[in-house]
Image (cartoon, rainbow, N blue to C red):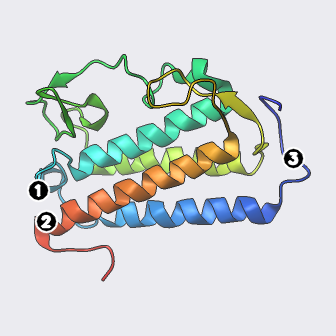
Amino acid sequence: MSTTGTTSTTTSSRERSDLLETLAKHRYFFRLTLRDLTDEQAGLRTTASALTLSGLLKHVADTEEGWVVFILGGPDAMSDGKEGNEQEQEEPAESAGGGGPQRGGTVDPRFVVPTGVTVAALLERYEHVARRTDELVGTLDLDADHPLPQAPWFESGARWSARRVLLHIIAETSQHAGHADIIRESLDGAKSMG
């Protein structure tokens, strides 16, 4: 299989449309959990988890961006990104700006929002990342693949196609939309649905 390329003649526009519509739906529900919140509220831990809405928003944007880098350049390009990189520096649990899941007394840096970064700025960045992904899906060879980065949670020697990566982005977005919904409901009773 090729590792780069443009639109495959066998890939239907319907498949691309389905991928984009599904991703858009889960992005919408994720963003909906942040409606009418202040930066302070979005940074609150409202459940037993260390997750915050602002930390989740940062992570979802970083994750989507990292996997798009993988689609375009493979695991070497991704090594500078966020997803699948165990070499990240961990920050103390007291980090400002909300946090995320804890690892051995520290907050996972993928969920730490730097001091002074607002929800509006995080949403703007997420919109930029989403536009880039959506534009790429229109021209991408969905069958192009790369070997996954070496990590204990990936099968040795496995390769993911661009299609498989997009499905992973959808799953990540959906999973974190659910996390966000629980955090928001614990904050003020608001729900995305129901």
| Three-letter amino acid code at the position of disc 3 | Ser
Provide residue 129's location: percent of width, then percent of height: 51, 44
Query: In the image shown, does 185 or 113 lie closer to the viewer?
Result: 185
> Given the image, on which type of amino acid does mark 1 rest?
Thr
Circle on res. 46: 1
Q: Where does residue 41 sit, x and y in percent of width and height?
A: 14, 56
Is residue 100 in view from this perspective?
A: yes
Q: Nearer the viewer, residue 15 or 29?
A: 15
Is 112 in front, or is 170?
170
**Element assignment for label 2:** helix
Q: Name the residue under label 3.
A: 8
Question: Callout 3: helix, strand or loop?
Answer: loop
Q: Do the residues labelled 2 and 1 touch (CB within 8 Å)?
A: yes
- Dot 2 or dot 3: first in sequence order is 3
Marks 2 and 1, how far apart in space? 6 Å
In the picture of the structure, the residue carrying the numbered disc 2 is 186
